Structure formats: structure tokens, C-alpha cells
Image: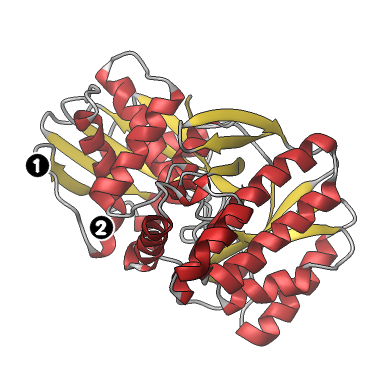
Amino acid sequence: MDGGMNDLVTPLAAPTEDSVARKFSEIYGCAPAVLARAPGRVEFIGNHTDYNGGAVLGAAINRQVWVAAGPGEPGRLRLASASAESRVCEVAAAGVTRRTGGEAWVNYPLGVWQALASCGLPRPVGADIFVDTDLPAGAGLSSSAALELGTALVLLRLAGGAMPAAEVLAQVARRAENEFVGVPCGLLDQGTIACAQPGRLVHLDCRGPVYRSVPFPAGAELRLFDTRHRHALVDGMYARRRGECAEAARRLGVEWLADLTPAEFQLRAAGLPAELLLRARHVVEEQARVAGTVEALAAGDLRRVGALLTASHRSSQHLFGNTTPELDFLVDRLTGRPGVLGARLTGGGFGGAVMALVTPEFGAGAGAAVGAEFAQVFGHAPVELALEVGGGAGLL
């Protein structure tokens, strides 16, 4: 990323309903017919467990993607984004194909367009779409899934059909990312964003999928430290890890790695190659950490919750190999500070951000001190965000 220190440490300004509608009108010459907003999410715990048949805990946050839309010209899709300087990308509605370069962002709404049809859901005959956000891209907050859910909502409303259940919307968005964008992700991101409730974590058992909500603990807060080291899951590392997990499951004789308890894994793991052993052990033990976190939250044991979060990061660091020096540095500096219960990477890894569970004792000055130490090593400060646990995607 180009730019000086101010570019690196200033969070994106938050759009409003009025600002999004105004920008849509400036581009397309009329008011939008429908607006939706879809939050980003933090992966509270459950790193790479979703596509391994496991459970995850996610939280929707108070930063989001806004999508405005109008009916547009039949047979045409027009897409614009504030982050792409509002340049309009025009696409024929029939036979859409993936874009590259500066237009690559449109693959997410185009993927939704395709997924609606393949799922037997209605689409409008055409659409004009404008997108704005205060979610930093590549920070592990799932801006892509938020864009997919927001797009699905506005297209379905323009089509005039009945709105499907949130769980169905999550599957549509996941299909868009898997089949069109090309990221073999699990259901964590789309499921959390579609099904979240204010003040509650989403517990998702991916084998069903089965959703339930878990109260976010009173007296705790979420802080995010965005390294500005961007991850790009379509570059192959995510797919490589998924392939390693699938091969490990095959060799262990199970459909899903999450089918094994840690004790069962120890009995079966002797013949695994060293790298597959590490990947599988992370997933099996992470599944146990998710269950332990749910129990600790129910008991109000925040210290245990924090210890499990930090243990999750160490497993990602030493077993799964999806952390970076920047992420590890932040976890090292955060853990042990007054008010920090635990810290871990959030999202797929290979870049992005660290999430910390903190108490009010961890003030703004403490975060700035961590940022200053980070800047001495890496040349720029991370962006620190105080996050609130909010509700899921919806129409306005």
C-alpha cells in the first residue's frame, strides 16, 4: 500500500444511509430503490475448523458494507464502489465472467448473481449497484462475505420474491465465493454475517449446519489491531491448507477431522507425514478449544476464555502455519498486559488482524503503546479499532 503514516493509521470513515443514497444518485442519476447493510465479522475462535466439519464462534461487528441498488437497464448489470473511485463496471447479465485487476472486486456481487440462479432464487432483469464500506479490505474481517450478503439482499428485493431464511442467504453467498470467486471457504463468514444477533456470538456447527447464539460476555470488549499486511486467500495458501486437511482426514479414515477427539487423534496419528500431522492436530485441538470456550462463556470464566483464545493463536502459529511475524508480534505484546484476557489472529490468516478480548482496564493509551512498539519494528502503526458485537445483514 502506498502512502505515509497517516494513510496507515486512519480508519475508513463510516458511510451513512444518506451518504450512500446520495452517491448512488450522483452515479446513476436517480435514487436507489433499495439499500442493505451487512456487517463484517470477527472469528472469535475456530480457525479453519468450518470446512473440516467443526464448530466455530463468530461475531458480527459495528463496521459494515453498504449496498444500494436500482432496477437498471434490462439485461445489464452496472456496479460501482466508493473505494474504486466510483468507476462504473458494466456487465451483460447473461454469461458473466470473472474480472481481474481494478475490477476484481465485482467478482463478489457477480458471484452472487450467478449463485441466485443456481439456487433457484429470483433475480431482477438488470440492476445498478453501488457499494461503500468502513471495513478495511484484507484485514480478516470478511469484507467479501459482507459484500456478498448485501448484494444478495438487494437483488432479491429488486426481484420482488419472498425473502429466504438467513441460513439460505448464507449458503448462496458461500456458493458465490466457492464457485465463482474461487475461494474454497467454509461457512463461518457468511453464516455469521447472515445470522448474527446484537450482543451475541454465533455458534455454528458446520456439519448441519446448525446455528445457535451465545451471549457475548458482559464486562468484556473486543479490540482489533489491523496489521495492514494484506492477505489474499485466492492466492492459493488457503486452498493448500484445505487440501492438506482433506488428505489428513483421508489417511486417518474419517470424513472430517472434527470427527476426532484429541485422544482419538493421538491413537491414529502415528503414520501421518509430519506436515499433515501438524495441520490435523491444529484442527482437532481447535475443535476442542471451541467447545471449551462455549463452556467457559456459559460459566462466566473470562480468564479461561482468554487463555483459549491465545492458545488458538499459538496453535495457528506453530501447527497450522498461517500466521505472520506481524500477527505474532501483536499477540506477544498484547498478552500479559493489564486488561488483556487473550489475543489471536482473526480470519484465515496469512496476514490481516489480531483480535484481543479486553476489559475496560485496557485503555486507549495501552493500545497506542502496542502500536508504537509495532511501528518501531515494522515501520508503520497498526490500525486499532474498538468493536461492538452487532446484528446481522439486513435491508433498510
Q: Residue at x 64, y 64 (%)?
A: 313
Examine the rendered structure and indicate whether residue 130 appears above or below residue 245: above
- Dot 2, how many residues are within 10 Å of its Cα: few (below 14), some (14-19), or many (20+)? some
Residue 116: x percent and y percent? 25, 30
Please report contact status of discs 1 and 2: CB closer than 8 Å, yes or no: no
Q: Given the image, on which type of amino acid does mark 1 rest?
A: Gly
Nearer to us in this view, 343 or 21:
343
Q: Which residue is mark 2?
A: 103
Quadrant where the N terminus sits is bottom left
Identity of the residue drawn at 59% across and 61% down: 266
Circle 2: residue type: Glu
Splitting the image into 4 quarters, where does residue 361 fall? bottom right
The picture places residue 117, in percent across and down from the top left corner, at 19, 29
Give the Cα distance between marks 1 and 2. Answer: 17 Å
Q: How many marks?
A: 2
The residue sitting at 66% across, 68% down in the picture is 314
Could you say which is closer to the camera, residue 121 or residue 380? 121
Q: Which mark is residue 95?
A: 1
Where residue 175 appears, as percent x and y from the top left, is: 30, 40
